[in-house]
Amino acid sequence: MKSVITGVAGFIGSHLAEKLLGLGHEVVGVDKFLDNYAREFKDSNLSQFAKHPSFKFINDDLVNIELHQLLNQTDYIFHLAAQPGVRSSWGEEFSHYSHNNILATQLLLEACKQVKVRKFVYASSSSVYGDTDDLPMRESGGTRPVSPYGVSKLAAEHLCYLYWKAFGIPTVSLRFFTVYGPRQRPDMFFHILMRRLLVDEEIPLYDDGKQSRDFTYCADIVDGLTAAAFYPGSGDVFNLGGGGEITLLNAIKLVEKVSGRKAKLKRFDRQRGDVRRTRASLGQAKKKLGYKPLVSLDEGLARQWEWISAMGK
Ligand code: NAD
Ligand code: UGA
């Protein structure tokens, strides 16, 4: 089996590469080392499997690559490359979001018309829902993103559906809910919180701390990704959540317990682009993918703390 992973040097892509190599796949990973965060994190992610005999790395922008060649003889495409981050997607930054999230996806889908892949799995986002009181968020519910990032992820999701409908490309979109665990991006909350606990610095807390998230452990997301590749259907959209909802203040208490340290919080206003609550309905993913999140928040946070502590200050 040959799999292509876009965004392979990133947080989630690197975990997926390890799982697929473990399953015996030949993996071709693409990443352009976007400067959304320090290169050293991405180098470290890649170093975990870069020397595996079944792994090949292409350091380039998807928009510049000869995509037909890349996809030749490919069974599965896992399209994770993107400019992530909701709060940073306003203003001039949006051109990067449209390039990396929309244009790159459209080019990849175009290239799929000339090859025969078994599945094209797209990493979508809970941010496509926006603010809603209709919880849990269901795939059949409305989508009204509140950040330009969410708009870009929804646009790419629509492109996946279109190319399935018009050209029969077997796409499936997975809406990930705030993913955490070892290698989490340094702009995400648990990473910031743990690093600052380690060096005894103040932690920026946006809004009142009563906003909530359905946090999802990275290994559960990776299980959802492979299940979506191997299930017999296509043209679907599935939520991948952690199975719970917790306020930020309660999540901070869990991290304090895991780390044995006390957080010094510094309050800031609610940030534009942030949603107030997320909670995933998992019925569809359970029914069609057999998806079941296995790692509790306590356990997942303990593993992330262990990783961040091992990295040192
Ligand atoms: P990440 O930034 O760690 O990884 C994304 C990788 O894609 C980066 O290494 C970047 O260099 C690469 N990339 C970006 N544009 C590229 C391009 N044009 N060509 C080649 N490489 C490119 O992010 P992540 O947190 O691992 O997220 C992975 C995917 O999951 C993204 O699509 C993101 O939108 C989605 N997602 C993430 C979360 C989360 O909580 N982390 C939640 C919902 C959805
Ligand atoms: C995360 C990812 O960053 C997005 O890429 C992804 O698409 C999205 O999940 C998703 O589920 O679709 P977010 O939920 O904002 O976005 O995750 P964090 O960046 O970890 O933020 C979680 C909460 O912590 C937010 O309410 C945020 O306002 C808050 N926060 C973040 C702070 O209070 N302080 C900070 O310094 C950072």
Image: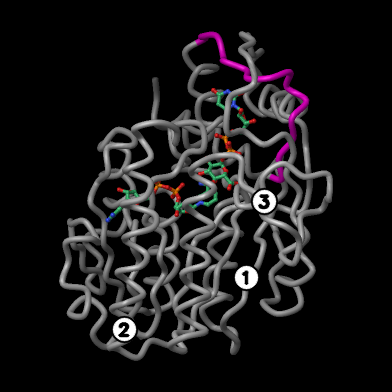
Question: For the point 40% across and 31% down, which residue is it?
Answer: 91
SS at mark 3? loop
256 vs 40: above or below: above
> Does mark 2 have its CB less than 8 Å from ligand 1?
no
Asked whether residue 201 is drawn in magenta, I would say yes
Near-viewer residue (214 or 193): 214
Q: Which residue is mark 2?
A: 74
Q: Which residue is mark 1?
A: 237
Quadrant holding the C terminus: top left
Q: Earlier in the sequence, mark 3 or mark 1?
A: 3
Near-viewer residue (225 or 212): 212
Near-viewer residue (79 or 44): 79
Question: For the point 54% across and 44% down, which residue is it?
Answer: 181
Q: For the residues carrying marks 3 and 2, which lies nearer the camera in this image?
A: 3
Cα gap from disc 3 to disc 2, whole angstroms: 32 Å
Query: Residue 47, how many percent across, how many down?
Result: 27, 51
Q: Quadrant of ligand 2?
A: top right
Query: Residue 66, how many percent across, how many down?
Result: 16, 72
**Residue type at mark 2?**
Thr
Q: Earlier in the sequence, mark 2 or mark 1?
A: 2
11 vs 158: above or below: above
Check disc 1: other Cα within 10 Å, few if <14, some if 14-19, many if 20+: many
Q: Which residues are magenta?
A: 200-214
Cα gap from disc 3 to disc 1, whole angstroms: 13 Å
Mark 3–mark 2 CB contact (< 8 Å): no
108 vs 240: above or below: below
Q: Which residue is mark 3?
A: 129
Asked whether residue 219 is drawn in magenta, I would say no
**Residue type at mark 3?**
Tyr
Q: Would you say the magenta stretch is mainly helix, strand or loop? A: loop
